[in-house]
Image (spheres, grey):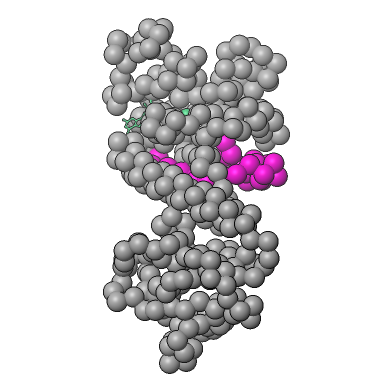
Amino acid sequence: MSSKLRLIILGAPGSGKGTISSRIVRDFKVSHLSSGDILRKHIREETELGLKVKELVSRGQLVSDDLITKVVLAELGRLSSTSWLLDGFPRTLSQCKALDAKKVPVDRVINLNVPFDVIVNRLKHRWIHPPSGRVYNLEFNPPKSPMRDDVTGEPLIQRSDDREDVVLQRLKIYEKQVKPLVDYYTSKKVLETFTGNTSDFIWPLVKTNLQALKAQKHAAETEEHQLAKIDSTSSSKEPVTHTGHKYAPDDFRRVRFEVAEKKVSPNWGIDLIAQDPVVVCNERIVWSSGGGPLGHPKVFIRLDAPEIHDCGYSGRKFIHKKFYDPSKHGASITYDDYLKEMHKQEFAA
Ligand code: G5P
Ligand code: MG
């Protein structure tokens, strides 16, 4: 896993994608790619593409999936080695699938949810600096000098698609297109929705979420690094503990558990802790993080089985006591038995 951030920001026209994006760029050092900014640049420079899309964009209509996908993927290709943030793309299910077809990884989809009446009002007051994509609002973040860009001093302009009738048209299109996108990314477990009337309210929530994501990716990277080390040093499939102790081959999925004295956190739901040493197995990798004081989880299971609960902390997956009954399973439980029990209980529920 890479600790680079690959982000998408979704939201209705005027929901604050550009505004929140500029704060993400500032605090997380990602490259910002706005499909709207790219199109407006082509329109300004009267390129072949610009002439083709000018009419559509000014009427608030979407340009064709093929065209925008080609343009954005080409730009994205140049950023593959850095962290990036896609703003305004994908906007349709077909654009989403085009990203997937190219195996473009996505770590988080930030979905901005701002009421439409708030949006219509704010777009009336939007002014932009086209060459840089910097966005101002005469009420919310006015330029330092009237109608001039803060950095270059160049004049600001209003977007042709910010007329009220065009804004309403854009919102209508958005409403229709966004649901399948939200469903798609929800099913991939990468979507987070942030609701509010102002960007100042939403921003700290986004920031906290991204900080957690970054920490999680960093932890996963460290873990991967350690696993790679284990893989490269062990030539046989015979499982060993992280202290180097070897287990009998037929014992390779057996981990001894002890019940934690107290719940570490209701959010994490950790109530079982493995005794050290824990078996490390390269087939279905099971190992101990090395532990630490109670409160720092000791055990995680690197299984992709959807049944294993993700505690949302460091991306680690924890075992739950409710699927382990010492009176039935004895002093320890195999992972197979644990999974069987989980299936049984979840199915019964
Ligand atoms: P764009 O450029 O992607 P939209 O329509 O998705 O355009 P837009 O208008 O750029 O989105 P935004 O980025 O979500 O809005 O919002 P923003 O610019 O940050 O904020 C809007 C205004 O509100 C600003 O003035 C800002 O200062 C202010 N503001 C922000 N927060 C607050 C707040 O809390 N309070 C107040 N009072 N104000 C605030 O796409 C343009 C066109 O390109 C084509 C389409 O034709 C599209 O219509 N296009 C695509 N077509 C097909 N597929 C794609 N993927 C396409 N991408 C672009
Ligand atoms: Mg924008």
In the image, the segment drawn in magenta is 88-116
Give the tally of numbered discs.
0
User: What's the residue at 71%, 34% (across, down)?
Assistant: 66
Q: Position of residue 67 (x, y in %)?
A: 69, 30
Q: Position of residue 94 (x, y in %)?
A: 66, 43
Asked if residue 305 can be seen in this view, the reply is no
Quadrant of the rendered structure where residue 303 is?
Answer: bottom right
Residue 255 vs 294, above or below: the answer is below
For residue 296, side relative to residue 251 (left or right): left
Asked if residue 276 can be seen in this view, the reply is yes
For residue 74, side relative to residue 111 (left or right): right
Q: Nearer the viewer, residue 264 or 292?
A: 292
Q: Nearer the viewer, residue 345 or 168?
A: 345
User: What's the residue at 55%, 32% (across, down)?
Assistant: 82
Q: Position of residue 3 (x, y in %)?
A: 51, 42
Is residue 103 one of those drawn in magenta?
yes
Residue 140 vs 226, above or below: the answer is above
User: What's the residue at 45%, 67% (across, down)?
Assistant: 299
Quadrant of the rendered structure where residue 70 is?
Answer: top right
Is residue 104 one of those drawn in magenta?
yes
User: What's the residue at 58%, 23% (across, down)?
Assistant: 38
Q: Nearer the viewer, residue 11 or 117?
A: 11
Q: Which residue is outermost to the bottom? A: 327
Residue 332 vs 28, above or below: the answer is below
